[in-house]
Image (spheres, rainbow, N blue to C red):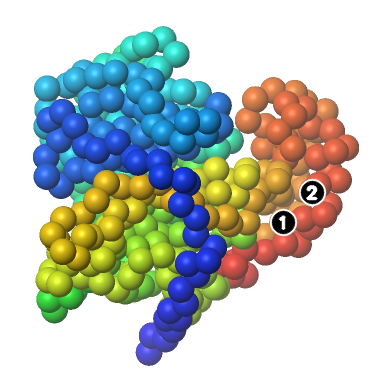
Amino acid sequence: MKYFYLILIFLSAAVGKLAAAEIPATAGTVNSKGFTRIDFCEADGLLYAFNGKDIYYYSNVSDSFNVVFANAGYSTTSTWDPADFSFLSDSNNVFLPTGESQKAVYVEMLNSIAAEKTVLNRNYYSTASRYRDNQLFSNGVGPVNNTIFMLDMSGNGSETQVTQVSSKNSGAIAFDYADNLYVADFKPVFDGRGLGYVDIYRISRGQLDSFAEDNSFIVAAKLIVNNALLAGSDSIVIDADYNIYMGSYVGIAKIVPTSDPNNYTVTSIDGNIYANPHGFPLPNFKFAGITEDIKSGTIYYGKSELDQNTYVYGPYTLYSFNMTAAEFWSADLDGDGIVDFNDLYLMQEDYLCDGTYLKGDINDSGFIDFQDFRIFANHWRNEAAWYKKD
């Protein structure tokens, strides 16, 4: 028999509004389902927004979003339902799936180039780039709804199917700081509440490395959260303690997994994570996705309040809260959930090597030396919350 417990704790004191910064409203050919997306860029340490037309960056000085790439969305004539907004690792290049129009736009901001990738004619729901490698992944409709693809942005674009995760509705995906890929799905509960069951799967870093080297490698996603009752799985981020933060249309939830996918806690960070997002009475707040700066330990999201007199929602305003920061990259080099001799073997393979995205370069210096081994030793035998010995 399944057993899981839901703990509802409001942590509003930990949530902060960034002055009065308004996130740009949707613009251009954006349909009624769309809302502005935000994403944090690791390359320059800035927060960005996309509203279906322009790309903006957030300025701490003026506490406002300013256009940095005008008309990026006009690179395709398709109607936008902004599905996601994802920067590639260590770059200002960004992938923009249009959503239901089954088109995708790739933007090289430093070169002022935005172009539709004509081969990528698929409904990509959510995208994510690895922290430690320049590889982009997306989930979308394949042989089943929730199918993971590895995308190549060169030329007109190309895709390689990685694995079929589930036949339920596609949900958000994200990487943790050990470069494990988390994949959510959503199955509606047709009881009038607008809620549904969310499953969360994990694909280990080791599997993705093997697949990148040989596409015939069989990737198997592992279930780590089973049937969490929420109002959606619109966006997801993971902190340095492997806690999962799930954004829905009506709130932000914190999910703490264990070695048993049926045993976890769900905590409300902001909003009402069990409100009906589409029913009446209307929820007091609407939310517009989450993103994170994992090195500083900050999660950003948009929040809009309902005017109780007019029943009209106000503009989305930028909010943030602090989580566990990732001072260094994870010493779990194979992503199996524990720092052990398998990781030590990978560490010593590249000892005294220099280069980009080396597995053992934990302090991200571009060189693997004693400093990395010192950090590795401090992480020895550390286990992720979801680790389960085979």
* Tags 1 and 2 touching, CB below 8 Å: yes
Decide: few, some or many residues near mark 1? Use Cα within 10 Å; few <14, some 14-19, many ≥20.
Answer: many
Label whose residue precedes the other's in the sequence (1 or 2)? 1
Give coordinates of residue 19: x percent, y percent: 46, 45
Give whichever of 261, 341 is nearer the camera.
261
Give whichever of 95, 262 is nearer the camera.
95
Quarter where residue 90 is shown: top right
Taking the image as shown, residue 344 lies to the left or right of residue 179, namely right
Give coordinates of residue 237: x percent, y percent: 46, 52
219 vs 364: above or below: below
Q: Residue at x 67, y 32 (%)?
A: 358
Q: Residue at x 21, y 37 (%)?
A: 26
Q: Quadrant of the N terminus?
A: bottom left
169 vs 373: above or below: below
- Element carrying mark 2: helix
Q: Amino acid at mark 2?
A: Phe
Q: Which residue is mark 2?
A: 376
Q: Amino acid at mark 1?
A: Val
Decide: few, some or many residues near mark 2? Use Cα within 10 Å; few <14, some 14-19, many ≥20.
Answer: many
264 vs 178: above or below: below
Taking the image as shown, residue 50 lies to the left or right of residue 110, namely left
Q: Which residue is mark 1?
A: 339
Q: Is residue 249 visible?
A: no
Q: Residue at x 46, y 36 (%)?
A: 63
Q: CA distance from mark 1 to mark 2?
A: 8 Å
